[in-house]
Amino acid sequence: MTRHIAGQVRIHAEEKGFSKVIMWSDGCAAQYKSKLPFYFAAQSSLEWVFFGSRHGKSACDGCGGVVKTLCDEDVRNGAIIQNAQQMFDHLMENHCLPENPPSDSECCHNRRSFRMIDEVERSMSSSALNTVPGTRKIHHITGQGDNTLLTRNFACFCNTCLGISDAVCPSSHVVNNWQETSITFSKTAAGPFGKASTPAAPPPESNPNPPPPESNPNPLPPEPASREGAFKTVQQEMCAASTYDELYSVIESNMEIIQHYQVTAAPSLHVTDIPSAQIDAQSLALRPGDVPWDLYPICIYGDGNCFPRTLSVLAFGRPDHHTEMRVRIVAELVLNYNIYLSTSYLAQGSTADGNLLLRLLLQDVDIADRSSLSPFEIFQSEILAIRRPGTDVNMWAVYAAANILQVPIMSVYPDKGEQEKQLLAKRTIVPFEKTSRPSCFIMWTTNRDDMVPEWWKANHFVPLLPMHPAEEPSVQVHDELKTAFLDGSAAPLADNLDSFPATDDFFLLRWQDNRDYVCQVAEMDMQQLEVLVNFMCQQDDSFYWGSRPDSSWETLDCFLANSKKVSMRLNEDLSTQRRVLFDIER
């Protein structure tokens, strides 16, 4: 956007006969004074001056504030604004200056002229570039083309600095000389959202006497033991930052370290793979019924780092990399803040409206007075809080987790507490880049036992994992039904059904011995018209799922003809049963 606006200003200046263009802006690292705008400036002859901290306010901030306030009020009154195009259309219809000059009696002080810019090129990612050394101290740059910049600590426009006079600059005791700086690319280029990808390199030229490799004065330690120390150092620098802009600069300067150590969700992780893992009995009792029956909550130490510890388990199979995961969460949110404030992205994987989800996210931030703050300012407050170890996170961290682990995240929330919290947290989080990898399950829970149901609130996170690796059942083909009873533990349902909960999720399947067995539909193959059912085990009047479930692939028509819902206690016609199955599939 900055490059586009600068180009339009240059065209306008040339049309008006101006020979020189100097652009002024504040020094916000998230928008202007960072490596990506520097890269764009280095491709041209753009001259750019940055105001000092807290000195960049001007009349344009008031103009923008009027527009933002109008849109905020309209959204609260029912307007739907989910993207730039919708905002532009809404403003043109409701808050645009009239074509004809208004009369003296007509009040138009809160109306503006608007222009939609939709041809912005976004071909470069900031994570593909190295940070310019001393960025925070730079306040004046001039592009030289070919990825080269002239930089200095302060701006001066005396005759000497403008090239009119050869005299000594009167501010030379404050303003240093121009320094030439080259924009360099990181060793590992990155995609548009920060996921590392290695560019194709040309084939090496043959050289019988290759020169020795250059020594790196500050090599990254490759040993696993140094990984924890590296991220602890980054976290200490993050906590030392006094403002959000400083935090952004710290993250940019440490991106080489963060990208050096790759991380993703561990494939095929099970409870038995984790040393000394224990089932969280309290969370198991809170696990909602729509979660697969073979996923179990694992005990996670509750010290305010439970969510980073949960991600560490999902990535490494152990919880001790929580410092690294917290650093990655903060870096992911800061570098892609515009995505995490986008209502269209927040709504992916949810049936709720994106504007509602953003409002609930902002309300979930622990801040004293939010009435005068913009969504981005509230977001900044949350980031500055969660960078510190032992600090609880909110749903934004779950969104970030999907892109850190590069898998869909199933956010599991118990059927308790506020309905709005369930609406926000009970859903699927989709990563930026589509993937076919299986989802990871993270459950919101509690480690308290003193909350009454009407005031219940989640304050803890745990991962949900299968107990054992899945095994393919051996299938024996019968005349009518295909069965895979592995150990003969499936038991017929007792005549008295009062001991079994009435739910639409369970069925009674009449077997060849003319007895009913409790089962649940696990999977449906709509091409082969077959249903995979898991049978429950029974001991006395208690029903439970075995560690190795009895499973059976049945033809759809055969299953419909021989089963009924437990909740109905009565046989149903075929059409009703088929609708139930299709509802489960959806």
Image (tube, rainbow, N blue to C red):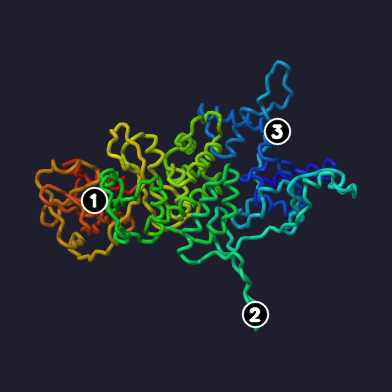
Can residue 579 be spotted in the picture?
Answer: no
Question: Element at badge 3?
Answer: loop
Label located before the other in sequence (3 or 1): 3
Kind of residue at disc 3 = Ser
Question: Element at badge 2?
Answer: loop
Between 347 and 296, the one lying in front of the other is 296
What whole-number distance in Å separates the C-alpha atoms at marks 3 and 1?
65 Å
Image x and y of residue 405, in percent: 45, 55
Question: Element at badge 1?
Answer: strand
What whole-number distance in Å separates the C-alpha atoms at marks 3 and 2?
58 Å
Q: Identify the residue under disc 3.
A: 58
Residue drawn at x 16%, y 49% is: 543
Quarter assignment of residue 97: top right
Residue drawn at x 27%, y 64% is: 472
Residue drawn at x 57%, y 54% is: 192
Q: Give neighbour class at mark 1: few <14, some 14-19, many 20+ (Cα, 10 Å).
A: some
Q: Identify the residue under disc 1.
A: 520
Q: Identify the residue under disc 2.
A: 210
